[in-house]
């Protein structure tokens, strides 16, 4: 191969998606401008003056040569990610003085991170994630004054985070997720990180107090601290995600006074006390706060009406707490709200009709929240709704006869275990996207509307434990996607439609307390589902 003799200025050799093997000819060393980018090969690289080595996303095995850095001193980019390489990371890489990017992620490297990497003064990106490394992060990493991405997530490293890392002013991303890093964060963590945009420290063993100086990272967009042992969090001007952290105590009132805050996630902790009654009030019309998740804590007291000042809120989740009192009518002012979760609390009173003003609402979940009274008709006018969950409350009275007139996007209607009565509205058949209809454990009367057979997308139909009577309509046999049919504990009579018994999709029937006429032996012989209960 003499291409370099005739083309000494060759800059790129693309051997992508081949099955080449063996060694690269040493004569290629004459191509001093060459960038090598080849995949799906198993070439041994030796004595080349190449600048870019991109061998990512192949099935390369074996170990890297210990003298790799000596052989390839001109390299600027090394990408060996997503292979099956083993062994230790060669210390000789420190001789690649021009190296700007090093990606060894998604391999099976072992051993420690060589301290010699700290001498790569031009390095801008370092990716060692998803390996089987051991030992700690060498403090020499702090010498990489041009580094802007440090990604060591799920790499097997342990030991405290060296404070020198937080002195690299060029850093934009620090990702140390899912390792075994103990210790605390330095109190002046953001003193030298003016460009930091993402700090990902989730699923480690970090503890102690969260530094208030995190607020000095003025460019920070994402902060992920899940699954650690932090004790306090406040004064953070950013996305605040501290779920699954064993946090205790009350939520600092000052959090809701931060005008730049976009997301608050304190879910799955042990926070107690009550929500500040003047939440969002001191900064009316918060311009950025879109997400509040305080679910699965031990919060008490009432839901503050001052939430109406969080005008941009899209998601509000307060489920699985000990909240009391009523649902404030002011929630109806959150016109951008898309998801509202208040389930598993100890609320009282009814659903305010002002909920009907939430024209962008997709999910309404008030399961097991202690509510009573009628379901306001206004709720069924929200055309954007995809899921209504009101299971296990004390809701009473009847459903509107035109219930699905505006619910063209509804996929799940869960009203089981309430005190609803009256006849089943025939217009439920207009909810053409409905996948689940659960009305179990109420006081409905009358017949099953034959029009239910038009709900061809339906997968779950639960009408058990009511006072429904009459025959099972043959039209239910049209429900070709039905997987779960529960009609037990009613006053149904007549013949089970053959199309239901021979359904290939339906996996569960419940028929208890239904009086049937004789069913032909042929029909019973053809039935394939597992029947539960008595025929």
Image (tube, helix red, strand yellow):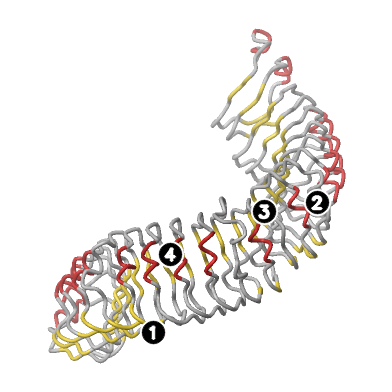
Q: How many marks?
A: 4
Q: Earlier in the sequence, mark 4 or mark 2?
A: 2
Q: Secondary structure at mark 4?
A: helix
| Mark in front: 4 vs 2 | 4
Q: Earlier in the sequence, mark 1 or mark 2?
A: 2
Identify the mark at residue 535; answer none if there is no mark.
Answer: none
Q: Secondary structure at mark 1?
A: strand
In the picture, residue 11 is in which quadrant? top right
Q: Please state the horizontal and vertical placement of residue 493, each as a whole percent of the image.
A: 16, 88
| Mark in front: 4 vs 3 | 4
Identify the mark at residue 189; answer none if there is no mark.
Answer: 2
Q: CA distance from mark 1 to mark 2?
A: 51 Å
Q: Please state the horizontal and vertical placement of residue 29, each as a whole percent of the image.
A: 73, 18
Q: According to the image, label 4 marks what residue?
A: 332
Q: According to the image, label 3 marks what residue?
A: 223
Q: Earlier in the sequence, mark 1 or mark 4?
A: 4
Q: Please state the horizontal and vertical placement of residue 297, each as a whole percent of the image.
A: 61, 74
Specify few, some or many for label 1: CA neighbours under 10 Å numbering under 14, 14-19, or 20 or more: many
Nearest the eye: 144 or 340: 340
Identify the mark at residue 394; answer none if there is no mark.
Answer: 1
Nearest the eye: 336 or 424: 336
Residue drawn at the location 29% of the way across and 84% of the way down: 464
Compared to 57, does 186 lie above or below? below
Give the position of the N terminus as an image quadrant: top right
Q: Secondary structure at mark 3?
A: strand
Q: CA distance from mark 4 to mark 2?
A: 41 Å
Compared to 186, does 391 lie above or below? below
């Amino acid at each position: 191969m003499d291409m370099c003799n005739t083309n000494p200025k060759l800059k790129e050799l693309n051997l992508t998606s081949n099955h080449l093997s063996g060694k690269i000819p040493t004569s290629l060393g004459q191509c001093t401008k060459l960038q090598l980018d080849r995949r799906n090969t198993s070439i041994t690289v030796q004595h080349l003056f190449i600048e870019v080595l991109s061998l990512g996303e192949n099935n390369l095995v074996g170990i890297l040569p210990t003298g790799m850095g000596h052989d390839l001193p001109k390299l600027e980019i090394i990408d060996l990610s997503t292979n099956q390489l083993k062994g230790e990371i060669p210390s000789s890489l420190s001789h690649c003085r021009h190296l700007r990017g090093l990606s060894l992620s998604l391999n099976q490297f072992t051993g420690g991170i060589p301290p010699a990497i700290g001498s790569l003064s031009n390095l801008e990106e370092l990716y060692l994630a998803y390996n089987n490394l051991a030992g700690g992060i060498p403090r020499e990493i702090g010498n990489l004054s041009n580094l802007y991405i440090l990604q060591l997530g799920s790499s097997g490293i342990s030991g405290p985070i060296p404070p020198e890392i937080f002195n690299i002013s060029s850093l934009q991303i620090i990702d140390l997720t899912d390792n075994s890093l103990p210790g605390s964060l330095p109190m002046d963590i953001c003193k030298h990180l003016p460009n930091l945009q993402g700090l990902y420290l989730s699923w480690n063993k970090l503890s102690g107090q969260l530094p208030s100086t995190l607020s000095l990272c003025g460019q920070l967009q994402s902060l992920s601290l899940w699954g650690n042992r932090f004790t306090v969090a406040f004064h953070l001007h950013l996305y605040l995600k501290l779920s699954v952290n064993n946090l205790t105590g009350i939520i600092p009132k000052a959090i809701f006074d931060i005008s730049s805050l976009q997301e608050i996630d304190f879910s799955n902790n042990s926070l107690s006390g009550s929500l500040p009654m003047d939440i969002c009030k001191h900064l009316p019309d918060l311009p950025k706060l879109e997400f509040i998740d305080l679910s699965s804590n031990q919060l008490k007291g009432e839901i503050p009406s001052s939430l109406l000042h969080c005008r941009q809120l899209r998601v509000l989740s307060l489920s699985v707490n000990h909240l009391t009192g009523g649902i404030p009518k002011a929630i109806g002012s959150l016109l951008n709200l898309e998801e509202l979760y208040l389930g598993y609390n100890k609320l009282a009173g009814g659903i305010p009709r002002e909920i009907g003003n939430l024209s962008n609402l997709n999910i309404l979940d008030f399961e097991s929240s202690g509510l009573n009274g009628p379901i306001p008709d206004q709720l069924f006018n929200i055309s954007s709704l995809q899921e209504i969950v009101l299971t296990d409350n004390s809701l009473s009275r009847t459903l509107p006869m035109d219930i699905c007139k505006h619910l063209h996007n509804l996929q799940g209607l869960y009203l089981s275990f309430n005190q609803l009565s009256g006849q089943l509205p025939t217009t439920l058949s207009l909810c053409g996207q409905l996948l689940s209809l659960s009305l179990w454990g109420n006081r409905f009367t009358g017949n099953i509307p034959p029009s239910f057979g038009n709900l061809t997308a339906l997968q779950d139909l639960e009408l058990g434990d009511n006072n429904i009577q009459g025959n099972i309509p043959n039209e239910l046999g049209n429900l070709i996607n039905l997987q779960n049919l529960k009609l037990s504990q009613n006053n149904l009579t007549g013949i089970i439609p053959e199309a239901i018994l021979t359904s290939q999709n339906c996996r569960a029937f419940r028929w208890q307390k239904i009086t049937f006429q004789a069913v032909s032996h042929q029909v019973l012989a053809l039935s394939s589902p597992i029947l539960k209960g008595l025929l």
